[in-house]
Image (spheres, grey):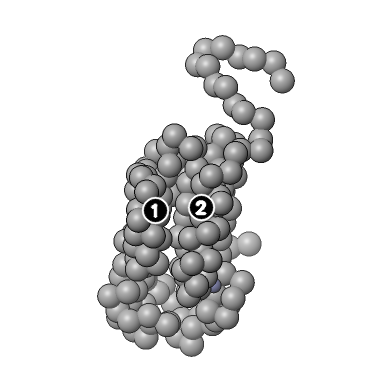
Amino acid sequence: MHETSRSGTTLGQVLKSDLPYMNRSENMRAVRGKDTKPEKTVRSMLHKVGYRFRLHRRDLPGKPDLTFPSLRKVIFVHGCFWHSHDCRKGQGEPSTNPQFWKRKRELTIQRDRRALEALAAQGWDAYVVWECALKNQDAVRNQLEDFLSRQLSMVRRQSRPGIVTGG
Ligand SMILES: [Zn+2]
């Protein structure tokens, strides 16, 4: 099956047209996938309770928004629309260029899934914060503190380079 990109809409063209749900500058940040407002909210809430973390580590699958190397945990902060959350905003259909958005969001879902699988395979514990959950910041903070303080339930991986241990 050959999939043609209908009418050849580029992201640039879409950005100049009507944008679903976001104003232009919000949308540009979301396209870049960095430093969005929800992400800043999460960073600042964890910083206040004393956590330190790295941002957008390129060497990890999916470039997690926050990485806690010593805990071997990562946090993603996902915008509901872009990552197709199971909520009203996440399931909304833009009126302009619906095919373009549909395809783009499907690719995002696949990329997210691959990243989470790859992280798990490397022994990283991951947590996704959805944008809409941040309406209740206290709840999110509690969940994140639980996540960051809990022990890995998996068998601990002791990787020693060059030494292969039998399973
Ligand atoms: Zn949502």
The local secondary structure at tag 1 comes to loop
Task: Give the vertical position of 143 relative to 55 (above or below).
Answer: below
Residue 129 picture location, percent across and down: 51, 61
Q: In this view, does 6 lie above or below 152?
A: below
Ligand 1 within 8 Å of disc 2? The answer is: no
Does the image show residue 116? yes
Asked if the residue at tag 2 contacts the one at tag 1, i.e. Cβ–Cβ closer than 8 Å, the answer is yes
> Where residue 77 sits: x, y (%)?
45, 60
**Amino acid carrying mark 2 in the image:** Glu
Q: Which image quarter has ligand 1?
A: bottom right
Q: Label 1, on which residue?
A: 49
- Give the CA separation, mark 1 to mark 2: 9 Å
Q: Which residue is drawn at 48% across and 75% down?
A: 135
At horizontal 30% and vertical 70% (from top left) the residue drawn is 28
Image quadrant in which you'd find residue 16: bottom left
Q: Please say whether residue 80 is visible from this viewpoint.
A: no
Q: Is residue 110 above or below residue 82?
A: above
Labels 1 and 2: the sequence-earlier one? 1
Above or below 30: residue 64: above
- Callout 1: few (<14), some (14-19), or many (20+) C-alpha neighbours within 10 Å? few
- The furthest residue to the left: 25
Q: Nearer the viewer, residue 29 or 40?
A: 40
Residue 6 lies, in percent from the top left, at 48, 74
Q: Left or right: where does residue 102 sit relative to residue 65?
A: right
Q: Residue at x 49, y 67 (%)?
A: 138
Residue 109: x percent and y percent?
Answer: 56, 60
Residue at numbered disc 2: 145
The label shown at residue 71 is: none
**Residue type highlighted by circle 1:** Val
